Amino acid sequence: MAPGDQHVTVDGHAIKISNLTKVLYPQTGTTKGDVLHYYATVAPLLISHAKMRPATRKRWPDGVDTTPFFEKTLPSYAPEWITTASLQHSDRIVRYPLVDDAATLLWLVQGAALELHTPQWKYDVQADEQRSPDRLVIDLDPGDPAGLRDCCQVALAARELLTADGLAELFPVTSGGKGMHLYASLPQPRRSNANDYARDLARRLTSRLPNLAIDRMAKVDRSGKVFIDWSQNNRAKTTIAPYSLRGRQRPTVAAPRTWDEVSQAADGTEALEQLEYPVVLDRIKFMGDLLAGLS
Ligand SMILES: [Mn+2]
C-alpha cells in the first residue's frame, strides 16, 4: 500500500481508502477524507432512496477544478460483492452498480465519484427486470435572473395540483446546482405513464403561471422564468440522487427541504439558498430524513 492508504471494513467488506488528504474542492479546502466522512454519515438516508437504482457516477479524481467524467459501466476492477444490473442500451449492454449498501457507496466515493445520478425506477435483481417508475421527479431550472425564490413559487403551485390529483406527498429538494427538484411517490395506476403525467403537469403549471414558468424543451428564451423539466421521468434519464454532493466550486448537496422553508422563500420572508454538506450533516441530526415516505 502507498503511504496514507488504509483499509476500512464496511458491511464485512474491506475497502482500500487512499489520498484522504487530497483536496477535491480547492475553494473550501474540502478533502477526499471529508467527502468520505460525509457519505459515510448520510449513507443510510442516501441508500434508502438510491437502492435498487442503477447509478451513473460523475467522477472528479483531480478535484472540481478539473474535467470530470461520466461513468456508467462498473469498471472491471470493481469488487465482486457489488450488486449490478446489466441493461440493454441501443448498441451495447451496460453493467451498472446498484447503490444498495454503504460498502458500495464508499467504494464508489473512494474513486472520487462525487455525484451519483439515478433513474426514477428500480431494477429487481431477483426477477432480473426493470420495474415501472415508482417516483415522479419535476426539475425546476431557473433562468437568470429568476432564482430559487421563483422555483419555490412554482413548487407551491405544483404541490396544489398534485394534491388535487390525489397524489401522495410532494417532497422539495434543492438540487445543489441552481434549482430544485420535486419528488412524489407514484401510485400503481400512474406508473405506466409517468412521463406523460409529468409532461401534462408541466403544461398545467405553465398555463397557471404564464409569467413565471415555461415547459418547452426548445432553447427558447428562458430568462427570468423557471423551466419545468418534466423529461427526467423518461426511463433513459437520471437525476442527481438526493443527498449526493455536487461537483461544483463549493461542496453543495442535493438537499431535502421543508415546505415551511419553501413557503417562506416564496413570499420573501426568508431567503432560500443551496446547502453545503456541513449544514446538511447538522440538519439530519435534528430533522432526520425529510424524504422518509418517498419510495
Ligand atoms: Mn436541473
Image (cartoon, rainbow, N blue to C red):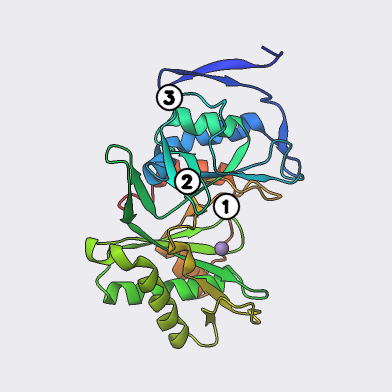
Residue 108, given in percent of the width and then of the height, sits at: 55, 33
Locate the N terminus and report the quarter of the image it occupies. Answer: top right
Identified by mark 1, the residue type is: Leu
Q: Which numbered disc, 3 or 2, marks the residue that appears first in the sequence?
A: 3
Q: Give me the C-alpha separation between circle 3 and circle 2.
A: 32 Å
Depicted 290 relative to depicted 142: above or below: above
| Residue displayed at 61% across by 32% down | 111
Identified by mark 2, the residue type is: Arg
Query: Which quadrant holds residue 201?
Result: bottom left
Out of 239 and 205, give the one closest to the viewer.
239
Depicted 213 relative to depicted 279: above or below: below
- Numbered circle sitting on residue 275: 1
- Tell me the SS state at disc 3: loop
Q: Which numbered disc, 3 or 1, marks the residue that appears first in the sequence?
A: 3
Depicted 98 relative to depicted 193: above or below: above
Contact (CB < 8 A) between labels 2 and 1? yes
Out of 53 and 30, give the one closest to the viewer.
53
Q: Which residue, given by chain and number where applicable, does mark 2 sit on? A: 283
Residue 158, given in percent of the width and then of the height, sits at: 40, 74
Q: Which residue, given by chain and number where applicable, does mark 3 sit on? A: 81
Identified by mark 3, the residue type is: Trp
| Residue displayed at 32% across by 68% down | 193
Left or right: where 192 falls relative to 274: left
Please rate how many residues cluster around mark 1, counting C-alpha atoms within 10 Å: few if below 14, some from 14 to 19, many from 20: many
Q: Quadrant holding ligand 1?
A: bottom right
Residue 89, given in percent of the width and then of the height, sits at: 49, 51
| Residue displayed at 37% across by 73% down | 196
Please rate how many residues cluster around mark 3, counting C-alpha atoms within 10 Å: few if below 14, some from 14 to 19, many from 20: few
Out of 288 and 242, give the one closest to the viewer.
242
Residue 219, given in percent of the width and then of the height, sits at: 64, 77
| Residue displayed at 39% across by 36% down | 100
